[in-house]
Image (cartoon, rainbow, N blue to C red):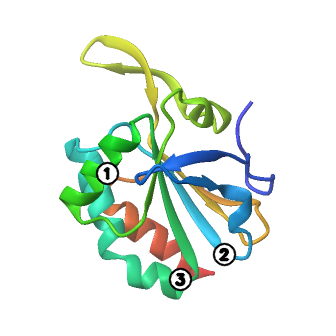
């Protein structure tokens, strides 16, 4: 089973980088870019987060909230946010339950080794809480451009 465009986005409540709970369904009325990434402070994840940070004004103008989700602890997310001066919400999915709900927790192969981990994927949730678009083909350095191009084409 997978997540498909048009279906209701699976709801969740996770702690943010300040250990405050954030619930997806409470954000109705705005679009939410829910992006899943493997681990804070790694090179690819840092480049991806920096692109979104630098695009915040454009995303705000398009009524889009950014929620980054990884299996990191809130403390690690605080450090990542501070070090990179991130201006959006990061959420801790330590038991990867939300990753599993969104089917992004999968078997990955890297350098001949296999392990379970987050497959980098982003979901655009519309103002009513439905999946509007799924971004799964992008480079970390271009992620923000792919998202903005899609939003501006609507």
Secondary structure beneath dot 1 equals helix
Q: Mark 2: which secondary structure?
A: loop
Residue marked by disc 3: 152
Q: Indicate which label's residue lies in the foreground, 3 or 1.
A: 1
Q: Please provide percent x and percent y for residue 127.
A: 73, 72
Which residue reaches farthest bottom?
A: 61
- Counting from the top left corner in percent of width and height, residue 67 is at 50, 58
| Viewport quadrant of the C terminus | bottom right
Task: Tell me, yes or no, if residue 141 can be seen here.
Answer: no
The answer for how far apart the CA atoms under marks 3 and 1 are is 31 Å
**Precedes in sequence: disc 3 or disc 1:** 1
Viewed as shown, does residue 35 lie left or right of 127?
left
Left or right side of 93 for 79: left
Crowding near pointer 1: few (<14 within 10 Å), some, many (20+)? some
Going from N to C along the chain, the mark reached first, 3 or 2, is 2
Circles 3 and 2: CB atoms closer than 8 Å: no
Q: Which residue is mark 2?
A: 30
At a point 23% along the width and 41% down the height, the residue shown is 42
Q: Are marks 3 and 1 in contact (CB under 8 Å)?
A: no
Which part of the image, by quadrant, shows the N terminus? top right
Q: CA distance from mark 3 to mark 2?
A: 16 Å
Cα separation, mark 2 vs mark 1, equals 24 Å
Q: Which mark is residue 78?
A: 1
Q: Secondary structure at mark 3?
A: helix
């Amino acid at each position: 089973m997978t997540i498909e465009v048009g279906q209701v986005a699976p709801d969740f409540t996770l702690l943010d980088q300040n250990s405050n709970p954030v619930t997806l369904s409470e954000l109705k009325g705005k679009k939410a870019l829910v992006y899943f990434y493997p681990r804070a402070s790694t090179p690819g994840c840092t480049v991806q987060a920096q692109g979104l940070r630098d695009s915040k004004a454009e995303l705000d103008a398009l009524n889009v909230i950014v929620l980054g989700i990884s299996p990191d602890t809130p403390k690690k997310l605080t450090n990542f946010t501070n070090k990179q001066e991130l201006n959006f919400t990061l959420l801790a999915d330590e038991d990867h339950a939300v990753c599993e709900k969104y089917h992004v927790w999968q078997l990955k192969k890297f350098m001949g080794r296999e392990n379970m981990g987050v497959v980098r994927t982003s979901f655009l949730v519309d103002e009513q809480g439905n999946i509007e678009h799924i971004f799964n083909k992008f480079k970390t350095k271009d992620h923000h451009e792919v998202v903005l191009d899609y939003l501006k084409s609507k």
